[in-house]
Image: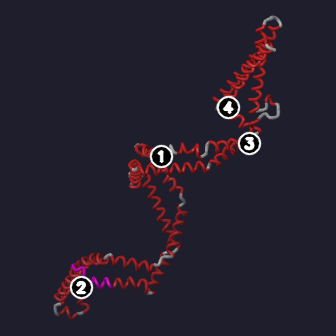
Amino acid sequence: MKKKKKQLQKHKFLATSLFVLMGLIYLLMLYLQQRINTNWIGYIKAFSEAAMVGALADWFAVTALFKHPLGIKIPHTNLISNNKNTLGENLGLFVSENFLNSKTIRPYVTKIDLSTFIIDWLSKENNLIKTKKEINNILKSILLKIDNQEISNLISKKIKEISYDINLSDLASKGLFYAIENNEHQRLISLLIPSAKHYVENNKVVIYDKVVEKNPILGLIGGKAVTNQLISGILSFLEEIENNSNHSIRNDITSKLYEISSSFKTDEIWKKRFDNLKQNLITDENIENYTLKVWIETKESLLSNLEDENSTLNKYLEKYLIEIQNNIAQNENTRNKINKTIHKFVYKLALKNSKEIGNIISNTVKDWEGREISNKLELEVGKDLQFIRINGTLVGGLVGLVIYFLSQYII
């Protein structure tokens, strides 16, 4: 700004000095004309006189653009300040119609190569780290700004909407049926049998005491031997179930489970039990408390992972960025899609907002004070306009010289 002001003052001084010089020459020629009788004085006098007229005319024209000459409010002066609204509208319209149209925008849009930029950017380790950090900071900023209660309320609302429509009896029936069809119950039986065998082997005394308690007479006629035989039979029976996947007990359990699965949907008692369970467990208060707790824990976990550069989340983010870079670099189709998408987006955005940009220019100019816009424009173009004054001085002088010559030798 200061540099522009100095340049403007410098060129104004140059143009004004040239005018003053012509004035001094003119006065000198008047003085010499009274004392020396020679033709060349008339030519110089005519040149300097016409030069002063040209300089004054162009000074008036240039000054009239930005202010009232000598502060006198002559009609059609101070043009920029008086017509700033019209100037702003015309400028906005000019920019939107001549610079933001399909013909002028398309050549520049088609030159955009975003895919190559992404490849080059992410191929450099420092840029990869910067990108990861920026994404990291954005995610942390979002998480920190999110209101916990609002998120909890939103999640709770969705859970409530879903939970009200949940049919627990139907869900339990389908879950049990799925488990049976995938032999999950058989795996459970196989896991339980070794524990049952271990319990029987390590609790012979307890079993003997229970047998004698129920049948005291067995204790008098060799109860331990009977009990040992009973235990041996139980262990043998359990081994049969364990080793035979098609054992009748297993089949009986499967059939019973199928019956239970079916009864979950058809038995009213089960339906009432599940409804009571849902009403007791899935209450608004329980849901709200649970979702708030889960969200806070999840949020803290995410923030902790984002802070830790060696966390799984950060490693995954870095890996994902590298995969993006490799995918774009190796896949021409992907590169073309990215570039076409950005071309289309920028092209539509520019055309869609061309009038809006014109309005922004127009409204900005309207909001400026008349004196402000005059000063701004004078700083930008005033320096060059001073050459009009200089040229006017010289051209005016030459025209005056030609006229004087013609009047002396032709007319």
Pointer 1 with pointer 4, Cβ within 8 A:
no
Please give the label number shown on residue 376.
none
The residue pinned by badge 2 equals 207
Cα separation, mark 1 vs mark 2, equals 80 Å
Q: Earlier in the sequence, mark 4 or mark 3?
A: 3
Secondary structure character of the magenta stretch overall: helix
Which residue in the protein does label 1 denote? 114
Residue 33 falls left or right of residue 337: right
Element at badge 3? helix
Q: Which residues are magenta?
A: 243-255
Residue 407 sits inside the magenta stretch: no
Say if residue 318 shows up in the picture: no
Is residue 252 one of those drawn in magenta? yes
Up/down of 16 relative to 123, above or below: above
Tell me which label, 1 or 2, sits earlier in the chain. Answer: 1
Where residue 172 appears, as percent x and y from the top left, is: 41, 78
Q: Amino acid at mark 4?
A: Val
Question: Label 4, label 3: how many angstroms apart (C-alpha)?
Answer: 19 Å
Q: CA distance from mark 1 to mark 3?
A: 40 Å
- Dot placed on the residue nearer the N-terminal end, 1 or 3: 3
| Depicted 35 relative to depicted 246: above or below | above
Q: Quadrant of residue 19?
A: top right
Circle 4 is placed at which residue position? 381
Label 3 – label 2 distance at C-alpha: 107 Å
> Above or below — where is 377 with respect to 55?
below
Which residue reaches farthest front?
A: 410
Q: In what quadrant of the picture does the N terminus appear?
A: top right
State the residue at coordinates (43%, 87%): 267
Residue at the image point whose x is 54% and y is 60% from the top: 147
Work out whether 108 lies above or below 192.
above
Q: Determine the secondary structure under disc 1.
A: helix
| Residue nearest the observer in this picture, 381 or 98 | 98
